[in-house]
Amino acid sequence: MSAEQSIDSTRTSPRWITGLVLGLAGLFYAYAVWNAVAHLIQMAQGGLTAGGWITLLFGVVFPAIVFVFASAIGRRRRAGELALALLAGLGIVAVFWLCVLSLSLGLIAA
């Protein structure tokens, strides 16, 4: 075994652990997308402006974009580092979702 191979084996986790981390995080991101779709349907029943449609549709797409970006950042890292990148991305999605909800409550109150 060469020195380069031993360095590579210590830097990455087994694929099944990486897959498990990606799968579990993917469930949380899918839940965020599901909530965004449900919120979009609920808000659309009352009528939306063009800006409302754009904002709420972006709320549906945003978790998927963040998941792809976070998994690309942690792609060749250990499973713990990948989990931290995905968790940070999930925090960003949560903050964005709270902003969308506050905007929606403002639209309802107005």
Image (cartoon, rainbow, N blue to C red):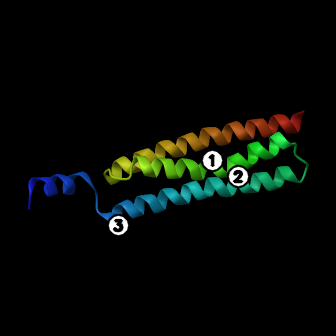
Q: Which residue is mark 3?
A: 16
Q: Which residue is mark 2?
A: 36
Q: Residue at x 75, y 56 (%)?
A: 38
Residue 11 falls left or right of residue 109 = left
- Where's residue 5, x and y in %? 15, 57
Q: Name the kind of residue labelled 1 in the image.
A: Phe
Closer to the observer: label 1 or label 2?
A: 1
Q: Name the kind of residue labelled 2 in the image.
A: Ala
- Where's residue 15, x and y in %? 33, 64
Q: Name the kind of residue labelled 3 in the image.
A: Trp
- Where's residue 14, x and y in %? 29, 63
Q: Which residue is mark 1?
A: 62
Residue at disc 2, secondary structure: helix
Residue at disc 3, secondary structure: helix
Dot 3: few (<14), some (14–19), or many (≥20) neighbours within 10 Å? few
Mark 1 in CB contact with mark 2 (< 8 angstroms): yes
Alpha carbon distance from label 2 to label 3: 30 Å
Query: Which tag, 1 or 2, sits closer to the chain's start?
Result: 2
